[in-house]
Amino acid sequence: MHELSIAASIVDAVTESAAAYPGARVKEVRLRVGALASVIEDSLQFCWGITTEGTPLEGAKLVVKILPVVTHCEACGKDGELQSLQSFRCPHCGEPCSDLRQGREMEIDSIEIDEVEEAV
Amino acid sequence: MTTRIVELRRGILKKNDELAAGLRGRYGAAGVLVLNLVSSPGTGKTAFLEFTLRELRARGAKVAALVGDLETDNDARRLAASGAPVRQINTHGICHLDAEMIDKHLAGWEGVSLEGLEYLFIENVGNLVCPSSYDLGEKIRVALLSVTEGEDKPLKYPTLFNSADAAVITKMDIAEPCGFDRDLALKNINEIRPGIRIFETSAKTGAGMDEWLDYLAEARGAHRS
């Protein structure tokens, strides 16, 4: 449901950052999204299409990289990637883990732009 | 024409996160404990909060509540019967509260200032998905679950339950006729959020509410020191 607000936030952020490159066209926007961020990629892609329509970002590709949840285990001291979100236990020793080192990210990693070479 | 990759490394909800950090600072400076209550529609957030506001007031505490819904001020009117100041936030279609809405509704709230409060409750829009992404600057995020919803709710909505600081099971007075499997529910909550404090309550009979109110008083004490 909130993918529309998220898409709108991405458009604002990218537009703001791309303003440093006048005349450039944004080709691709790359995101890093944690598995616990409650973002559904299909709906985000759908909302991205709607939100960018008629803006300078229209046609830009949205690439979403999903990051697995990484736990840090106090019992065995190891970090581990969770294979599912049904049980927050250390993948190495099976102890419950409440210390998460990755999985809630929701960030714009980078953008790819075509720059116009200025004739000075 | 040259192609260039520009590193941004910026949070998508940066604006919300910055506003929330500002709010958190203001709550801390004013010494008010702020809680964000999140659950499905129909879990009984409002009944639970009505009881909480009434009892805290009876104990002499200064409390207030902000309540989010898509439409209507029904909940605000219900909660206002407790005697506490209550302000309704209508999101008009948006499925969660965000820091900007809280900021706006704190400003110009007649007769209420953060400095004059000990507890501020924020009842989020009934939704188990979207509110988990939006920080409101709260100290404690409470996930609520009623005995009628099924013991596997935490497994179905791990993103919310994992981000909670406390869990409340509501409507315990009808647990038996509902065939509620208490052990399974507790186990599931613990699988998703190991070690979380869990309160088993009924706003109808008052069961479990003393424990909850003591927890609030303790949390506020810890918050201030």
Image (cartoon, coloured by chain):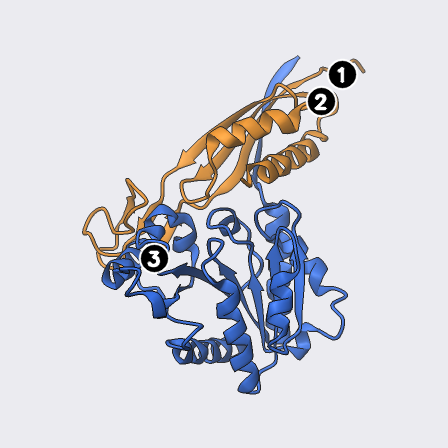
Chain colours: A orange, B blue
Q: Does residue A31 sit above or below A38 in this rendering?
A: above
Q: Which mark is residue B79?
A: none
Which residue is more in the foreground, A62 or B144?
A: B144
Which quadrant is home to the C terminus of chain A?
top right
Identify the residue position indicated by label 3 in the image.
Answer: B193
Looking at the image, tell me whether mark 1 or mark 2 is earlier in sequence order.
2
Q: Position of residue B210 (x, y in %)?
A: 41, 80
On the rendered structure, is A55 left or right of B12?
right
Q: Position of residue B105 (x, y in %)?
A: 70, 61
**Callouts 2 and 3 close, C-beta under 8 Å:** no
Which subunit holds the residue at mark 2?
A
Residue B132 appears anywhere in the view = yes
The nearer-to-camera label among 1 and 2 is 2
Q: Residue at x 46, y 42 (%)?
A: A38
Location of residue A13 (image quadrant): top right
Which subunit holds the residue at mark 1?
A
Q: CA distance from mark 2 to mark 3?
A: 43 Å
Q: Position of residue A58 (x, y in %)?
A: 65, 21
Which subunit holds the residue at mark 3?
B
Which residue reaches farthest left?
Answer: A93
| Amino acid type at mark 1 | Glu
On the rendered structure, is B169 left or right of A94?
right
Residue B198 appears anywhere in the view = no
Identify the residue position indicated by label 2 in the image.
Answer: A54
Identify the residue position indicated by label 1 in the image.
Answer: A118
- Identify the element where label 2 is drawn: loop
| Circle 3 Cα neighbour tier, 10 Å, few/some/many (<14 / 14–19 / ≥20) | many
| Amino acid type at mark 3 | Arg
